[in-house]
Image: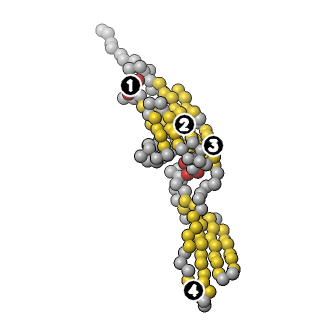
């Protein structure tokens, strides 16, 4: 009695470059994930990119992104500090998958400071204005959404600036 057994080469990622990358803010980042599979499955081979929390990356998610599913490239223009994190490359066919991870760190100024003037209030004809500066983070790998870094109190000719180290 003969057995018919179908043997196929597994889908595997052959290279991921770079696996660790540190760039300055506003840089264009290109991650390249190369994969191979059995020749019978080659037509179904695709490479997708995900964030560390498994959100699939696409231009619809962020217009700065370009993903080439055939060549396995992820291109991010104008990288920002909040883009720092882990990126997962997943190569898949109809039969199997393989994955690998890259770590991106974006350095530089972490924000464009936005100043807000809160409503003035009068007290004995002395007007008090408060200016609030804050930094907004959009890092999918961090639960932090807002960091208050400084506020300034202007009262007559007195200028008082106080730093706040609290994250909210």
* Residue 39 can be seen, yes or no: yes
Q: Earlier in the sequence, mark 3 or mark 4?
A: 3
The residue that disc 2 covers is 31
Q: First in sequence: mark 4 or mark 2?
A: 2
Identify the mark at residue 43; answer none if there is no mark.
1
Mark 4: which secondary structure? strand
Real-space Cα separation, disc 1 to disc 2, in angstroms: 22 Å
Give the side of residue 123 with respect to residue 12, left or right. Answer: right
41, above or below 114, in the image: above
Q: Residue at x 54, y 62 (%)?
A: 146
Q: Earlier in the sequence, mark 2 or mark 3?
A: 3
In the rendered view, would you say 163 is above or below 47?
below
Residue 15: percent from left, percent from top: 55, 29
Q: Nearer the viewer, mark 3 or mark 4?
A: 4
Coloured how?
A: secondary structure
Can you tell which of label 4 and label 2 is closer to the viewer? Answer: 4
- Write down the residue under mark 3: 22
SS class, disc 2:
strand
**How far apart, in angstroms, are the residues tagged by discs 3 and 1?**
34 Å
Residue at (56% x, 80% y) in the render: 120
Q: CA distance from mark 3 to mark 4?
A: 50 Å
Marks 2/3: CA distance? 12 Å
């Amino acid at each position: 009695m003969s057995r018919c057994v179908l043997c196929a080469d597994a889908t595997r990622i052959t290279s991921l470059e770079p696996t660790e990358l540190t760039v300055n803010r506003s840089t264009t980042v290109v991650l390249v994930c190369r994969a191979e599979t059995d020749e019978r499955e080659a037509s179904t081979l695709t490479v997708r990119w995900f964030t560390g929390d498994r959100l699939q990356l696409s231009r619809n998610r962020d217009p700065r992104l370009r993903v080439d599913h055939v060549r396995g490239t992820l291109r991010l223009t104008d990288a920002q500090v909040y883009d720092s994190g882990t990126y997962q490359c997943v190569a898949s066919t109809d039969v199997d998958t393989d994955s690998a991870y890259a770590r991106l760190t974006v350095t530089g100024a972490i924000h464009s400071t936005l100043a807000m003037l809160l409503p003035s209030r009068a007290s004995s004809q002395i007007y008090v204005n408060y200016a609030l500066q804050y930094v907004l983070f959009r890092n999918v790998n961090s639960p932090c959404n807002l960091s208050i870094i400084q506020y300034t109190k202007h009262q007559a000719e007195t200028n008082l600036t106080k730093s706040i180290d609290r994250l909210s």
